[in-house]
Amino acid sequence: MKIAHCIIPLLLLAFSLRPRTLSLSGISAEKHSRILLLTAHPDDETFFFSPTLTALIHMQNASQISEVLVVCLSTGNARGLGRTRIREFDMALEVFGIRERNGFILDHPYLQDNKTAFWDPTIIARELYPFIRTHGITTILTFDAQGITGHLNHGSALAGAEQLLRDLDNSGGSEDDSESRHNMTTSSRSQAPRLFALHSRRHATKHLGPIAALPHSLPLRQRRKPETEALFVASAGDYITAIRAMMKHPSQLNLRWTGEFWKGLFSRYLWVNEWFEVVI
Ligand SMILES: *[C@@H]1O[C@H](CO)[C@@H](O)[C@H](O)[C@H]1NC(C)=O
Ligand SMILES: *[C@@H]1O[C@H](CO)[C@@H](O)[C@H](O)[C@H]1NC(C)=O
Ligand SMILES: *[C@@H]1O[C@H](CO)[C@@H](O)[C@H](O)[C@H]1NC(C)=O
C-alpha cells in the first residue's frame, strides 16, 4: 500500500509534465474578474485548493484576471495554535504568489475552529457582505456541502456564501426599482458574484494523486461530467508549488507526517480541482 502510494504517483509525474489543462467554461475569467477563495482553516488553501490557486495566479500574472483573494473564516485555533497558523497562512500565500494585501483571516467568536460546530450562515454572510462590496468580488470559490473531509466548518463556508448571495440579491433588487425590468436584471446580476463549490470525491479516489489528473491530461478527455463546470489540473511545477506551500504549514504537518502525511502528498486535491456552480 505504502509503495503504491509513493512509486506510482512518482512515475506518473512524468505524464503531468505536459502543459496544464484548464477548462474554464464555467468560471468566466475576464480581465475584471476578482476571484475570492473562501476557506475555513489556515492550510485549506494549500491542501485542497492548490491547483486552482496556481492556475489563477498564472492568469493574474498574464493579466487575464484582475485579483485573487483568500478569506479564511477562522484562525484554526482548535488546538491553541491559532497564532502560529496565521503566520503559516501568510507564508503559504506568499509561496503561491498571492499579493500580501489579498489574504485575510477572520477571528470571530462564533466562527471558531470546531469539528462539531456548523457555523451560523447569517454570521458568515454578515462578516463577508462589506468585504464583497469593497473588493468588488465577481466570483466566490469555496467547499461544497460535504467539504471534502466532512468537517462541519467546511460545509458552513458554502452555507455562508449562499446566505451572502441571498442578502446581496435582496439589497440589489431594492436599490434600483425605478429602472426597466431588463436593466434591473442585468445590473443586479453584475453585482452579485457567481458562486462555485469544489466537488468532494468519494473516499476511494481521494489519494489517487496524479492518477486523478491523468484522465484529464489525456487527449480523450472529451466527456466531462456534466456537473463539472470548471476544472483545474496541476502541472508538475504547480504540484511542487503546492508542496512548497505545504512545508509552510509545519504545525499541521507534524500531525500528518506519519501515514497521513503520505496520503496528504498524494491527495487528488493537490492535482485536480473540479468545480460546479451553485445557483441560488
Ligand atoms: C507571478 O508574478 C510574480 C511577480 O512578478 C512572480 O514573483 C511569480 O513568480 C509569478 N508567478 C507565476 C505563477 O507566474
Ligand atoms: C464545539 O461545538 C460544539 C457544538 O456546537 C459545542 O458543544 C462545543 O462546546 C464546542 N467546543 C468548543 C471547544 O468550543
Ligand atoms: C439601462 O439603463 C441605462 C440608464 O440608466 C441606459 O443607458 C441603458 O441603455 C439601459 N440598458 C438597457 C439594456 O436597457
Image: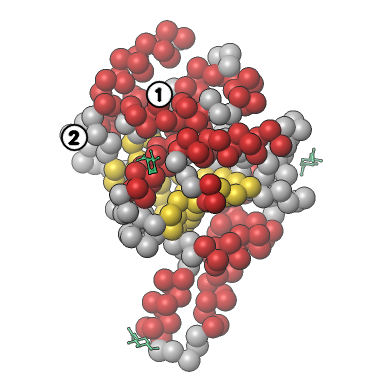
Q: Tell me: residue 43, above or below residue 174.
A: above
User: Which quadrant holds residue 51?
Assistant: top left
Between 75 and 248, the one nearer to me in the picture: 248
User: Which quadrant holds residue 217?
Assistant: top left
Q: Please give the label number shown on residue 265.
A: none
x then y, percent, for residue 176: 50, 85
Ligand 3 lies in which image quarter?
bottom left
Query: In the orientation shown, which residue stands out farthest toward the bottom?
Result: 178
- Mark 2 belongs to which amino acid? Leu
Residue drawn at x 55%, y 82% is 174
Q: Tell me: residue 190, above or below residue 24.
A: below
The residue carrying mark 2 is 220
- Mark 1 belongs to which amino acid? Leu
Residue drawn at x 52%, y 79% is 173
Between 16 and 121, the one nearer to me in the picture: 16
The residue carrying mark 1 is 208
Element carrying mark 2: loop
Locate residue 122 relative to residue 66 in the image: left or right: right
Q: Is residue 84 visible?
A: yes
Q: Is residue 150 visible?
A: no
Contact between marks 1 and 2 (CB within 8 A): the answer is: no
Q: Tell me: residue 279, above or below residue 98.
A: below
Element carrying mark 1: loop
Between 105 and 200, the one nearer to me in the picture: 105
Dot 1 or dot 2, earlier in sequence = 1
